[in-house]
Image (spheres, grey):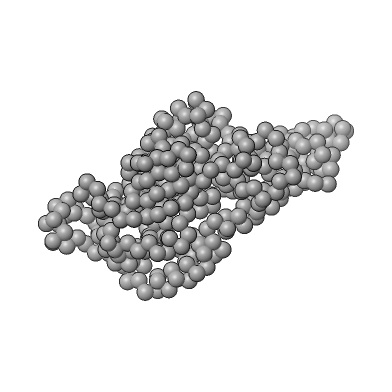
Amino acid sequence: MPVPKPQPGQSQDEFVQSCMANETMNREFPDGPQRFAVCNQAWRDRDKMVQEVLKKYYGDATGPLGTPMQSAAAKELEALIKTLPADCRTALTEAGGPLRLGFAAKVADIDENDRTEKSFVTTDSIDRDNEVLVMSGIDWKTFRKNPVVTFNHLYHELPVGRALWVQRETRNKRDGFLAKTRYTPRPEEWRDAPWLPDAVWHFVKSGDMPGKSIGFIPQEVRPPSEKEIKDRPELAGVHRIIAKCTALEYAVCTVQSNPDAVVQAIGQKAVIVPSIFLEAMGLEIPGLDDPAPEKPLAGKNLLDIHPVATASSLFDYVRRRVKAAIPGIIRDEIDRLAGRR
């Protein structure tokens, strides 16, 4: 008999609960623990599908720093890391992956129809860790080979968009890189399920999520020079200057985001906000769950339309999974003791 399949936008808790309550599943698997195991296996099978689709976006290999990417790029980075000076390798080790610098930038040239905006993704301003990137030293060749834009550098989620271009520009005496980002539109088949790019696009264009962050491999780091401090006295307190680096990514991030705007938008039902978005914002809204589609996508394979935009349930705690199954298991045990099974 066919086991129910997770639907787009459905969390693991929601799927396990519906699977446990399914009449056919109750008939075919009257033993609660067995039914629970079958439902969770169905979810794991769905995870495998999601991972296959993520590979199509990010690449078929895992890079030397643990991020997914194309095989050719992974080999190039592996060779690059071997040539890094000791202090740069130490910085990567301490960070546990690519170094990242984030800041808040004003979004401009918003195009509602094309779902695009322009904003700086990095500048030579001093970041929160007292570090400064030298714009002339950033190499974007690796990023341009697959210019996907993530949300908060979360590679277990679908990218929220794509960079159409990245170019160096100077404004208000600040040197930086301006990028044009296009946010992925919702597929027609997605219906009312949460679509992460929709939520991110909503708050970016409203100005309530101005953050951008780049991930990079440092190739030359040093303290500020006397000339640099003379030209910019504020550099005297800088921890280090990153004079040369290879850019791997940029992401829309929650730096200086407005949590009140998120709560208000949810209350007004202005946008469906996936749980992964709330987790990144550090928000907990009691009683709020990712809504599932009203009807199953009959005849559609998840890979044929699009993977789920919120894969946060991949990391749900065991406690939550067990909690979802407890009511059905208790009912089964009561029925068994009462002789109804």
User: Which residue appears at 60% of the width and 55% of the height?
Assistant: 53
* Location of residue 334 in the rendering, given as x and y in whole percent from the top left corner: 79, 32
Residue 319 seen in this snapshot: no
> Relative to 56, is 150 on the left or the right?
left
Q: Give residue 99's position: percent from left, percent from top.
A: 37, 58
**In the image: residue 43, left or right of residue 173:** right
In front of the other: 53 or 81:
53
**Residue 167 placement (x, y as % from top left):** 34, 55
Task: Judge from the rendering whether residue 341 lies leftward or rightward of residue 116; answer left or right.
Answer: right
Extreme residue toward the top, this view: 268
At x 18%, y 54%, the residue is 235
Q: Residue at x 64, y 41 (%)?
A: 189
- Residue 264 vs 255, above or below: the answer is above
Location of residue 29 by image quarter: top right
On the picture, is 170 further left or further right than 99? left
Q: Say if 205 sits above or below 307 in the image.
A: above
Which residue is rendered at x = 64% and y = 47% of the image? 305
Q: Measured along the vertical axis of the image, is residue 87 above or below residue 324?
A: below
Q: Position of residue 80 (x, y in %)?
A: 40, 71
